[in-house]
Image (spheres, rainbow, N blue to C red):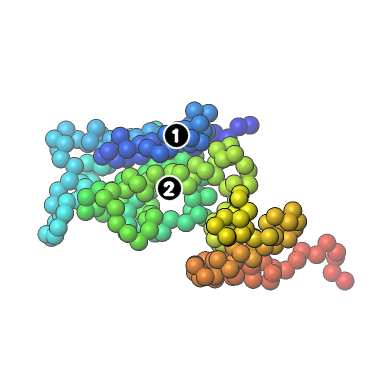
Amino acid sequence: MPKKPFHVGVLTLFPNLFPGPLGISIFQRARDQGLWTLQTFNIRDHAPQKLKGRMDAPPFGGGKGMILRADAIAPAIDAATKKIPNAPLICLTPAGKPLTQARIQKLAQGNGVILLCSRYEGLDERIIEARNAEEISIGDFLLSGGETAALALIEAALRILPGVMGSEESGTAETFHNNLLQHPHYTKPALWENRAAPEILLSGHHARVKEWREAQALRRTRLRRPDLAEKHDKSAKTMLEKPRRSTEKDA
C-alpha cells in the first residue's frame, strides 16, 4: 500500500517565497508524483477585517521593533490545522530548540507539518501557548523571518521520504547518521593539482574502503564536532553493554 503524501502547510506574510528552491529538481518531481503537498496560508488573508491589514503592534512595556499580533495569526493557524489535521505546529524562531536530524526523521514519519514563520521582532507569546506550537531554531544566528528556516526544515524532511531521493541509502549514510559527520569524498581525476585521491578508494577493496570511511567519519567528527562525537561514543557504549538475549533456558 503506497504511503500517503507528506503534507506541508506554511503560515507566512510572504507566500510568494514558496516553494522557492523546492520548486525545482528532485523536490518538484516528488511533488508532481504526489509524494508531498504544499499549501501556503497568507496570514493577512485570514486575519480579522477589523485589523485592516495591520498584523503587528508595538511591544507592551516598550522596546524596539514590532510584534506580530496573536489575534492576527490565530485564524491562519486554525485554517491550516483544519486542512492538515494531526500535523504538529512548529514556529520557526531563534528562541526555539535546535533542529536536529533526529527531529527531522520523526517529523518525516508523520502525516505532515504546519510551519509558522515569525517576522519582525517576534510574535506574541500567547499564540505559542494557546495553539501549543513547538518552537524550533535552525541555528544561533538571526534572520529577518522564519521563511528561510521553514524551507530548510521542509527540504530536510522531504529528502528522507521514501521515493524522493534516487537511492535508498542516500537518506541514511550521511552526515548526522549515528551522530557522525560524513566522511570526505573524492572523484575524478585521481590526481588534481598534485593532490592525489586516497589510494584505498581506488583499490576496489570494498571492505577496506568501508573501514576507511568509518574511521574518517569518526576522526572528522572528533575534530569538528566533539559534541556529536560524545553522543556517538555514548550510543556505541550503550549498544556494547546491552545484554544479549539468550536463546537457551537458564540452567
Depth check: give the residue in front, 213 or 45: 213
Residue placed under numbered mark 2 in the picture? 153
Q: Name the quadrant of the N terminus.
A: top right
Say which element carries label 1.
loop
**What residue appears at the point 53 percent right and 28 percent down from the top-left corner?**
33
The amino acid at mark 1 is Ile
- In the drawing, does residue 242 fall left or right of residue 117? right
What label sits on residue 134 in the rendered view? none
Q: Position of residue 42 (x, y in %)?
A: 28, 35
Residue at the image position 46 percent from the left and 40 percent from the top: 112
Q: In this view, does 8 lie above or below 128?
A: above
- Whole-angstrom CA distance, mark 2 to mark 1, is 16 Å
Give the mark toward the camera: 2 or 1. 1
- Which corner quadrant of the image does residue 20 belong to? top left
Residue appearing at x 38%, y 46% in the figure = 150
Dot 2: element:
helix
Q: Is residue 199 above or below residue 147?
A: below
Whether 168 is drawn above or below 79: the answer is below
Residue 25 on image: x %, y %:
48, 35
Q: Mark 1 points at which residue?
A: 24
Q: Can residue 89 be seen in this view?
A: no
Q: In which quarter of the image is residue 88?
A: top left
- Which of 96 and 198 lies nearest the eye of the viewer? 198
**Lower position in the chain sequence, tag 2 or tag 1:** 1
